[in-house]
Image (cartoon, rainbow, N blue to C red):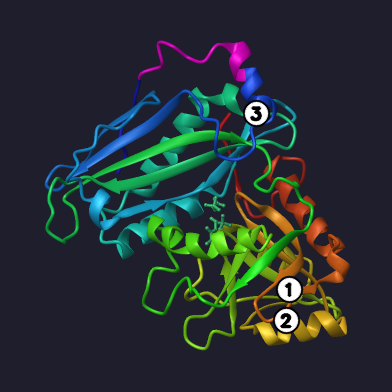
Amino acid sequence: MSLKFEIHPSANPTPEKERAAKLENPGFGRVFSDHMAIVRYRQGEGWHGARVESRAHFPLDPAGAVLHYAQEIFEGLKAYKRDDGGVNLFRPDANAKRFRSSAERMAMAPLPEDVFIEAVEQVVRIDRAWIPGGEGSLYLRPFMIANEVFLGVKPSAEYIFSVIASPVGSYFKGGPAPVSIWVSENYTRAAIGGTGAVKCGGNYAASLRAQAEAIEHGCDQVVFLDAVERRYVEELGGMNIFFVFEDGSLSTPPLGTILPGITRDSIITLLRDSGTVVREEPYTIEQWRKDAASGRLKEAFACGTAAVISPIGKVHSASGDFAISGGAAGPVAMGLRKMLVDIQYGRAADPHNWIRKVL
Ligand code: PLP
Ligand code: COI
């Protein structure tokens, strides 16, 4: 299926000087570009009304389904400015596929993958002036909400799909400096049969109390344990996790209840390309603590679109704290970060065809 997008450029785009000031130090997720894409769905009619227009408020009926039963999903991907002035997207097909599986899990209308990609590309094209230079990027946030006006609990018959864009720098204030994480012993994120493996807003709502606890304990992020035995490390609030061992191998928690991260998958592929052993296997918090103390564990790092690759320096929990590699950024995490970022910005070869040149 393909839909033709009507393009309606903003009559009042942000003046150049104001835009340049906003791009100087954008942080993460507070600055927005001038346009958005929008596509609507109605049962019986299908996907229709594809438009790119000025970023504006959505009129929402107070009985709209998303406001009551949280039928909402989203994605996150970035557009990168190449040295030759062109623009790359990184694996947008993988985001489109995951968005589809999120929709299926949440009983929402699946959006055709080519419509997802087209919407993202249209926003990048019209708002290309909003892509920061240097190590910044334009974070794209495709999302879908249920907007049937009905209070019965059932899958909505109407949806709005939209893409907004936000110029970003680093997700963490300290850039790629090591982050500290808090082990959540009171709250879990996902159980088998739940929604952990999809990107629905509800997962993040349910993580906020644990994330607040992390902040209260002076940590940057929360790490969740499995919901059954409360021992196996699963993932952070918004990132997957890897462990680096002294024999040169790595491990990462297996798929199931965690989000199948595109960064995670890319890292596994890059490591295997270079002959490095990566295991997708369960790892307990007790073992993590022991391995950090004995020196068997050399590094740990978090990864995701927003966070890229961020070394983990310190782990705090109600049952005690420990440091990894003395709290410093390790060479494996930093080397992988460079390898990945070089592909994303078009500075290195792309043997897996991950890059989609938009401009
Ligand atoms: N895990 C969670 C809970 C996330 O929110 C994210 C971010 O999207 C990730 C992992 C990493 O996924 P990706 O690498 O596709 O951005
Ligand atoms: C992303 O990395 O794209 C996410 O959605 C995670 C969130 C913490 C911003």
Residue beneath disc 1: 243
- For the residue marked with disc 3, what is the amino acid? Gly
Residue 312: x and y in percent read 74, 64
- For the residue marked with disc 2, what is the amino acid? Trp
Residue beneath disc 3: 86
Q: Which numbered disc, 1 or 3, marks the residue that appears first in the sequence?
A: 3
Residue 79: x and y in percent read 59, 37
For the residue pair 322 and 191, the one nearer the viewer reads as 322
Above or below — where is 87 with respect to 343? above
Indicate the secondary structure of the residue bearing disc 2. helix
Asked whether mark 3 and ligand 2 are closer than 8 Å, the reply comes as no
Image quadrant where one finds the C terminus: top right
Above or below — where is 223 with respect to 254? above
Residue 261 visible in the picture = no
Magenta-colored stretch includes residue 16: yes
Residue beneath disc 2: 288
Dividing the picture into quadrants, the one containing residue 106 is bottom left
Indicate the secondary structure of the residue bearing disc 3. loop
Q: Which residues are magenta?
A: 8-19
Indicate the secondary structure of the residue bearing disc 1. strand
Q: Are marks 2 and 1 in contact (CB under 8 Å)?
A: yes
Above or below — where is 118 with respect to 97? above
Q: Which numbered disc, 2 or 3, marks the residue that appears first in the sequence?
A: 3
Q: Residue at x 37, y 53 (%)?
A: 73
Q: CA distance from mark 2 to mark 3?
A: 43 Å
Dividing the picture into quadrants, the one containing residue 269 is bottom right
Q: CA distance from mark 1 to mark 3?
A: 35 Å
Q: CA distance from mark 2 to mark 1?
A: 9 Å
Q: Residue at x 36, y 77 (%)?
A: 193
